Amino acid sequence: MTDFLMVLFIYIGIYSIASLGLNLIVGYTGLLSLCQAAFVAIGAYTTAIIMTSTGLSFWWVLPVAGITASLSGLLIGIPTLRLKGDYLAIATLGFGEIVKNLIINWDSVTKGPMGINGIPAVNLFGIKLTILDKLPWMLIIWGFVFITYYLVRRIVRSRIGRALEAIREDEIAASSMGINTAKYKIGAFITGSFFAGIAGGLYAAYTQAVAPNTFDFMMSVMILCMIVLGGLGRNIAAVAGAVIIVLAEFTPRLLGISNIIPPQLNQILFGLILVMMMIYRPQGLIGRKKINYAAIVKKEILNLEK
Amino acid sequence: MPLLYTENLRREFGGVIAVSDVSIEIHKGSITGLIGPNGAGKTTLFNTITGLDYPTNGYVFFKGEDITPLPAYKITRSGIARTFQNIRLFKELTVFENIMIGRHFRANHPFIIKNRLINFILGRILVKREERDIYENSIKWLNFFKLGEYRDEYAKNLPYGKQRELEIARALATEPEVIFLDEPAAGMNPRETAELMTTIKRIRDLGITVVLIEHDMKLVMNICDRIIVLNYGRKIAEGTPEEVRNNREVIEAYLGKSDE
């Protein structure tokens, strides 16, 4: 039972990192992106390929996974300069499918539909961590969740975050305030996909295997569901959303009724959640918090002058 | 030399000529009014000057430099701010945050490292200095417009007149040399309009050049040093309020031709 709970928390942690990243893109900058799973996939496959082929330490590979994902974020970020709203969502949807198909068909590198198995165990201070070492994995992943949370918080509470929110509220007004909207929109994609890449890297290293079907459109929807459920544009809500959605997905297994309930039920559930939230609580369960910059800055000015 | 001038500025939308070879001059420290019947091309002229729209032909010069091809954000950075006819505030942000965004690009702390990413990694001290600069300047404009009591209110919850003021405050926070006001008095009651008149004069007294589109003739005639009249995209008259008021073409544009 405790083992199962730890697995649960490992998955919640991985999803939290990805949803915190997506929140930066969708929640703060207002760009509807449906390809977060593709970034996770790129991070996971980068980790898997480099670790199996070169035997490089995971701790070197993880940043590479993040950077690879953010480069692909740059790639999808460029069309966002011309696309808005629904059209952008469709473009990102297409990008997600391209990545998935690329993984399935590029046999020589990704081993196609079979996926990559036997990723070497991660070495932490001389101890090899396999999928069975749940407690250390849980601690490592939640360590990353806290780092991600802190970084995202720092971003959104600076003038960068205000610029992103200005773009979400009114792009034309933002550009006439001297904000280079193109730079910030691409920046949001790069940063958000970086965190997704990190989440993917952690996933690959923990499960020691990756398969293309994990990173399908449903995963993107799941991550989107998390931030919508928690509340767009609020970091703690992204984590809370991850907790609820992962719990919802794993509850049948937890209760031992996963044989009776068809797996499609999850998809119905997510769809239902999204629709219900839009109707009854569009601001999310937690909602957006009004950040009192005046008070924050005042406090910090006093600190500076001390 | 005028602070800002256009040369044969032209903007066509398909077959419609919204702005037809308009050359105007804006002099430093003046209040210039831009008037004309609905659809005369006033807002299009504003948009082409401030970079939200590109002219089909012609040039815009600001401080002697050609700013025609620049994107909107660069034009704002060069010292031209604007407000919008249909208020474009950041509705889900507070009044204070709205003004802070206006200060966004000016807040470069006195360190050599211009790369924000490096500063971000370097730590909080630099960010704090940046934020202090933004804070102090935003407070200045908040007080200039006496919006203090609304500081932490969402912009969308403000009364209409205050929203217009906030939009001007936000534009002024970019520290412009010229501010373009697109119908600042639209929808205001007479008392609010009178207040706006004083505000515009106060802005001028700060050394900021004002250009405004307005339909309220009392306001235009009272505060403008010069008036430019557009009709069907063409500049039909230009001069002091007195001259424009007695111009035959202007009267015809507004009231129609007499039968004689």
Image: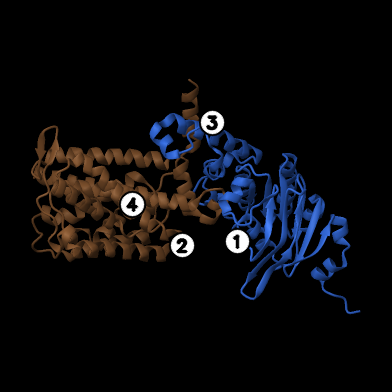
Residue at x-position 40% and y-position 32%: B122
On the same chain, marks 3 and 1? The answer is: yes
Chain painted in blue in the figure: B
- CA–CA distance in space, label 4 to label 3: 32 Å
Residue B242 placement (x, y as % from top left)? 88, 56
On the same chain, marks 2 and 3? The answer is: no
On the same chain, marks 2 and 4? The answer is: yes
**Circles 3 and 1: CB distance less than 8 Å?**
no
Nearer the camera: disc 2 or disc 4: 4
- CA–CA distance in space, label 3 to label 1: 34 Å
Label at residue B110: 3
Provide the residue designation for mark 1.
B53
* Circle 3: element type: loop
Label at residue A71: 4
- CA–CA distance in space, label 1 to label 4: 31 Å
* Circle 4: element type: helix
Q: Colour of chain A?
A: brown
> Is residue B133 among what the camera can see?
yes
On the same chain, marks 2 and 1? The answer is: no
